[in-house]
Amino acid sequence: MAALLVLCLTCLVLCASYIPPADAVGLAEPGSGGGRAEIPAVESAPPVASEPPAEERPENAADVYINGVLRGECLLIAGRAYMSMEDFGELTGLTYSGGRLEGLEPELDESGKWAVVQGRYIWLGEGLQEQDGRTLWPLSALGRMFNCDVTWHAETGSVDVDATEIAPLVSGDEYYAEEDLLWLSRIIFAEAGNQPMEGMIAVGNVILNRVASPLFPDTIYDVIFDTRYGVQFSPAETGGIYCEPDEEAVIAAKLCLDGADIAGSSLYFVNPDIGADGWFRRTKTFVASVGDHDFYA
């Protein structure tokens, strides 16, 4: 009888229709202390959090180099480079807090076209820009506030900020020479007192460009009263130059002395409606029309 049972068991195993109990083939039950190690269940790995996609670089972004080292980027808007005060501080090592950069807090004119810092007048052109809840300043204006030269490199589409002598700008009382301010504001008022601010700045640009040119005298006063090739500015002959300039003309003069540039390299200007402009058109390079005046280099 025993032999018959063994024979039946063998047949069932061979036909795979019977699975013998664990103790019948030497496998240990879990926790039984048998001779074979228990095989732990395989746990599934926790899901891996996916990283957020890299922020896409705006099409109007440009690289910003600080002292020749790539440090960040700015945005190009209407042909000018813009950056927030916070980012400028971070790139240059200046402290930003509560609208102040290294303790300086610019005051915007109600027109938004210029800011006053330490009694200095900084031209903003089209004003500040708002983007994604951030206020962006012209990078050239931020550089001016801290004695940094800002240079646009067209060939690489990048901006270089020379911050080797970075420091808050000196006050207007120290910076603006009294005589220069007096005569520059007088010629601006006499020639363009009825023009918008851009027109007044452009006239001031011509005076300062002449001061810098070897073709003309090297002081504002001497440029205004230059007669080597005839009277250069009619108010010097008619006496209009001695009229007291208004506040706008004084501001325009300060903006010019602090780098505002509307007329580029122009050395001449003429009102084509009342002045003979044929000589300018034949012999000089047209630069721009600003208000009632045409400007030539």
Image: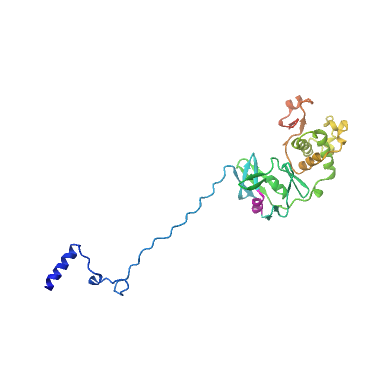
Q: Residue at x 12, y 70 (%)?
A: 4
User: Left or right: 185 with respect to 151?
Assistant: right
Q: Nearer the viewer, residue 83 or 169?
A: 83
Report if residue 88 lies within the magenta region: yes
Above or below residue 25? Residue 89 is: above
Where's residue 31, x and y in %? 32, 73
User: Left or right: 135 with respect to 24?
Assistant: right
Where's residue 5, x and y in %? 14, 70
User: Left or right: 3 with respect to 208?
Assistant: left
Q: Main secondary structure of the magenta part?
A: helix
Report if residue 83 lies within the magenta region: no
Where residue 23 sits, quadrant-wise, is bottom left
Q: How many marks?
A: 0
Q: Quadrant of the N terminus?
A: bottom left
Q: Residue at x 16, y 67 (%)?
A: 10
Above or below residue 207? Residue 143 is: below
Task: Read off the magenta span.
Answer: 84-92
